[in-house]
Image (cartoon, rainbow, N blue to C red):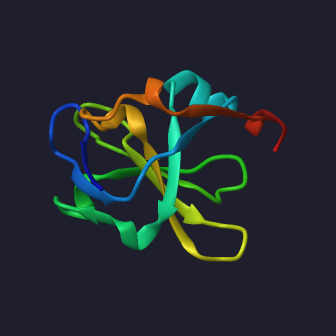
Amino acid sequence: MTHQGSCHCGRVVYELEGEITQVMQCNCSYCTRKGYLIAFFPRQQLRLKTPESNLASYRFNKHRIDHRFCPVCGCGPLAFGKDRTGNDIAAINVRCLPDFDPSTVKVVPVDGKSL
């Protein structure tokens, strides 16, 4: 299944190849303020349709996750990082997938505040 995603203004556009079966709702200070619902995928399943230079970057705490956002509209559609075995991952904010309904999948709480 292919999902189309973007920031609010359309400066950042991407495609995600994969099925979303659950999302994570993290309670860390960043995710809580942004209202993120996140699904994780291997990085190679994400294809940016606009230049990566259209994205700004924000890192905090242990600097393990590269939170990416649009510098024009401020929307944060995705982040990059590594999984526990060192593989590149993409963390997708499913709220930035206009054709995806998050109420159709399980929401898993994550205690990011304690990490």
Q: Which quadrant of the figure contains the N terminus?
A: bottom left
Q: Is residue 93 left or right of residue 85?
A: left
Q: Which image quadrant for residue 33?
A: top right
Q: Residue at x 22, y 36 (%)?
A: 72
Residue 112 lies, in percent from the top left, at 74, 39
Quick check: 47 above or below 67?
below
| Nearer-the-camera pick, 100 or 8 | 100
Identified at 52% across, 65% down, the residue is 89
Q: Reply above or below: 94 against 56.
A: above
Above or below for 92 versus 88: above
As drawn, the residue found furthest toward the right would be 114
- Which quadrant is home to the C terminus? top right
Determine whether, in the image, residue 79 is placed left or right of residue 18.
right
Q: How many marks?
A: 0
Q: Quadrant of residue 69?
A: top left
- Expressed as whole percent of the image width and height from the top left, the position of residue 86 reads 66, 77
What residue sits 78% from the left and 34% below the top? 113
**Residue 27, horizontal then vertical, whole percent:** 69, 29
- Give 59 or 81, whichever is nearer the viewer: 81
Of 43 and 32, the residue lying toward us = 43
Q: Residue at x 51, y 47 (%)?
A: 39
* Left or right: 102 in relation to 38: left
Relative to residue 3, is residue 93 drawn left or right?
right
Q: Nearer the viewer, residue 12 or 89?
A: 89
> Quadrant of residue 85 in the image?
bottom right
